[in-house]
Image (tube, rainbow, N blue to C red):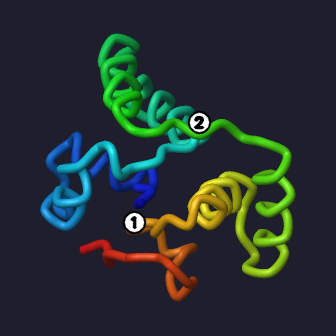
Amino acid sequence: MNLIDTCGWIEWLTDGVLRENFAPYFVHAERLITPTSVQFELYKWVSRHQNTEAALSCVALTEQTLVVPLTTSIALLASDLSIAHKLSFADAIIYATASYHQATLITSDDHFLGLPDVVYFQKR
Protein backbone atom coordinates (compact mmCIF):
# COMPACT_ATOMS: atom_id res chain seq x y z
CA MET A 1 0.00 0.00 0.00
CA ASN A 2 1.07 3.57 -0.69
CA LEU A 3 -0.07 6.98 0.45
CA ILE A 4 0.60 9.87 -1.90
CA ASP A 5 0.96 13.16 -0.07
CA THR A 6 -0.94 16.24 -1.25
CA CYS A 7 2.12 17.56 -3.08
CA GLY A 8 2.20 14.37 -5.17
CA TRP A 9 -1.45 14.71 -6.12
CA ILE A 10 -0.85 18.31 -7.14
CA GLU A 11 2.23 17.40 -9.21
CA TRP A 12 0.31 14.64 -10.97
CA LEU A 13 -2.86 16.66 -11.59
CA THR A 14 -1.09 19.82 -12.79
CA ASP A 15 1.56 18.11 -14.91
CA GLY A 16 4.21 19.46 -12.54
CA VAL A 17 7.95 18.88 -12.92
CA LEU A 18 7.79 15.82 -10.64
CA ARG A 19 4.73 14.32 -12.36
CA GLU A 20 6.68 11.42 -13.85
CA ASN A 21 8.06 10.50 -10.42
CA PHE A 22 4.59 10.23 -8.92
CA ALA A 23 2.75 8.82 -11.96
CA PRO A 24 3.62 5.12 -11.45
CA TYR A 25 2.01 5.19 -8.01
CA PHE A 26 -1.31 6.32 -9.47
CA VAL A 27 -1.57 3.34 -11.86
CA HIS A 28 -3.13 1.07 -9.24
CA ALA A 29 -5.63 3.18 -7.29
CA GLU A 30 -6.67 0.10 -5.33
CA ARG A 31 -3.21 0.12 -3.71
CA LEU A 32 -3.50 3.73 -2.54
CA ILE A 33 -4.81 5.09 0.71
CA THR A 34 -5.85 8.70 1.06
CA PRO A 35 -6.37 10.37 4.43
CA THR A 36 -9.29 12.75 4.63
CA SER A 37 -6.70 15.41 5.55
CA VAL A 38 -5.18 15.02 2.07
CA GLN A 39 -8.65 15.46 0.60
CA PHE A 40 -8.97 18.66 2.65
CA GLU A 41 -5.61 20.01 1.48
CA LEU A 42 -6.21 19.05 -2.14
CA TYR A 43 -9.71 20.57 -2.22
CA LYS A 44 -8.43 23.79 -0.64
CA TRP A 45 -5.45 24.08 -3.02
CA VAL A 46 -7.47 23.40 -6.19
CA SER A 47 -10.30 25.70 -5.08
CA ARG A 48 -7.80 28.50 -4.52
CA HIS A 49 -5.93 27.99 -7.81
CA GLN A 50 -8.84 26.97 -10.05
CA ASN A 51 -12.44 26.71 -8.84
CA THR A 52 -14.82 24.63 -6.74
CA GLU A 53 -15.88 22.42 -9.65
CA ALA A 54 -12.28 21.47 -10.40
CA ALA A 55 -11.65 20.86 -6.70
CA LEU A 56 -14.63 18.52 -6.45
CA SER A 57 -13.37 16.62 -9.50
CA CYS A 58 -9.99 16.16 -7.81
CA VAL A 59 -11.59 14.91 -4.63
CA ALA A 60 -13.65 12.48 -6.73
CA LEU A 61 -10.37 11.01 -7.99
CA THR A 62 -9.27 10.37 -4.42
CA GLU A 63 -12.48 8.42 -3.88
CA GLN A 64 -11.07 5.74 -6.19
CA THR A 65 -8.55 5.00 -3.42
CA LEU A 66 -9.18 3.76 0.09
CA VAL A 67 -10.15 6.95 1.92
CA VAL A 68 -9.11 6.84 5.57
CA PRO A 69 -10.79 9.08 8.14
CA LEU A 70 -9.00 10.35 11.20
CA THR A 71 -9.60 7.89 14.04
CA THR A 72 -8.55 8.04 17.66
CA SER A 73 -5.82 5.47 17.03
CA ILE A 74 -4.37 7.48 14.15
CA ALA A 75 -4.68 10.75 16.10
CA LEU A 76 -2.74 9.36 19.06
CA LEU A 77 -0.08 7.85 16.80
CA ALA A 78 0.15 11.21 15.01
CA SER A 79 0.74 12.96 18.29
CA ASP A 80 3.60 10.60 19.15
CA LEU A 81 5.10 10.96 15.66
CA SER A 82 4.73 14.73 15.80
CA ILE A 83 6.77 14.85 18.99
CA ALA A 84 9.35 12.34 17.78
CA HIS A 85 9.90 13.93 14.35
CA LYS A 86 8.84 17.54 14.93
CA LEU A 87 6.00 17.30 12.41
CA SER A 88 3.15 19.79 12.02
CA PHE A 89 -0.39 18.65 12.74
CA ALA A 90 -1.25 17.91 9.09
CA ASP A 91 2.07 16.21 8.34
CA ALA A 92 1.79 14.08 11.48
CA ILE A 93 -1.74 12.96 10.53
CA ILE A 94 -0.57 12.00 7.03
CA TYR A 95 2.52 10.17 8.28
CA ALA A 96 0.56 8.42 11.04
CA THR A 97 -2.08 7.28 8.56
CA ALA A 98 0.62 5.74 6.38
CA SER A 99 2.30 4.14 9.38
CA TYR A 100 -0.95 2.81 10.84
CA HIS A 101 -1.80 1.13 7.52
CA GLN A 102 1.78 -0.06 6.93
CA ALA A 103 1.90 2.00 3.76
CA THR A 104 4.80 3.83 2.17
CA LEU A 105 4.44 7.61 2.07
CA ILE A 106 5.25 9.05 -1.36
CA THR A 107 6.10 12.76 -1.18
CA SER A 108 8.25 15.71 -2.17
CA ASP A 109 7.60 17.48 1.14
CA ASP A 110 10.99 17.86 2.82
CA HIS A 111 9.41 17.60 6.28
CA PHE A 112 9.37 13.84 5.64
CA LEU A 113 12.93 13.59 4.32
CA GLY A 114 14.82 10.80 6.04
CA LEU A 115 11.84 9.29 7.86
CA PRO A 116 11.27 5.52 7.69
CA ASP A 117 8.95 4.18 4.98
CA VAL A 118 9.05 7.37 2.92
CA VAL A 119 9.85 7.68 -0.77
CA TYR A 120 11.01 11.25 -1.23
CA PHE A 121 11.38 13.10 -4.54
CA GLN A 122 13.46 16.25 -4.30
CA LYS A 123 11.84 19.37 -5.73
CA ARG A 124 13.66 20.76 -8.73
Quadrant containing the N terminus in the rendered view: bottom left
Label 2 crowd bin: few (<14), some (14–19), many (20+), radius 10 Å: some
Q: Amino acid at mark 2?
A: Thr
Relative to 41, say whether 12 is above or below. below
Label 2 sits on a secondary structure element that is helix
Q: CA distance from mark 2 to mark 1?
A: 16 Å
**Residue at the spot x=46%, y=39% of the render?**
66
Pointer 1: what residue?
A: 106
> What's under tag 1, amino acid-wise?
Ile
Q: Is residue 84 left or right of residue 44?
A: right
Place residue 87 in its image quadrant. Answer: bottom right
- Which label number is shown at residue 59? none
Tell whether 124 sits left or right of 59.
Answer: left
Describe the element under mark 1 as helix, strand or loop.
strand
At x 13%, y 62%, the residue is: 20
- Residue occupying the far bottom of the picture: 114
User: Could you tell me residue 73's position as x and y percent?
Assistant: 82, 52
In depth, the one of 112 and 1 nearer the eye is 1
Q: Is residue 41 left or right of residue 61?
A: right
The image position of residue 122, as x and y in percent, is 32, 78
Residue 12 horizontal/vertical position (percent): 22, 48
Residue 11 location (% of width, % of height): 26, 52
Q: Looking at the figure, which quarter contains the C terminus?
A: bottom left
In front of the other: 6 or 49: 6
Q: Earlier in the sequence, mark 2 or mark 1?
A: 2
Q: Residues within 10 Å of mark 1 (few under 14, many from 20)?
A: many
**38 or 3, which lies in front?**
3
Q: Which residue has dot 2 on it?
A: 36
The reply to whether the C-beta atoms of the residues labelled 2 and 1 are less than 8 Å apart is no
- Residue 29 location, quadrant: top left
Q: What residue is drawn where x is 54% and y is 75%? A: 112
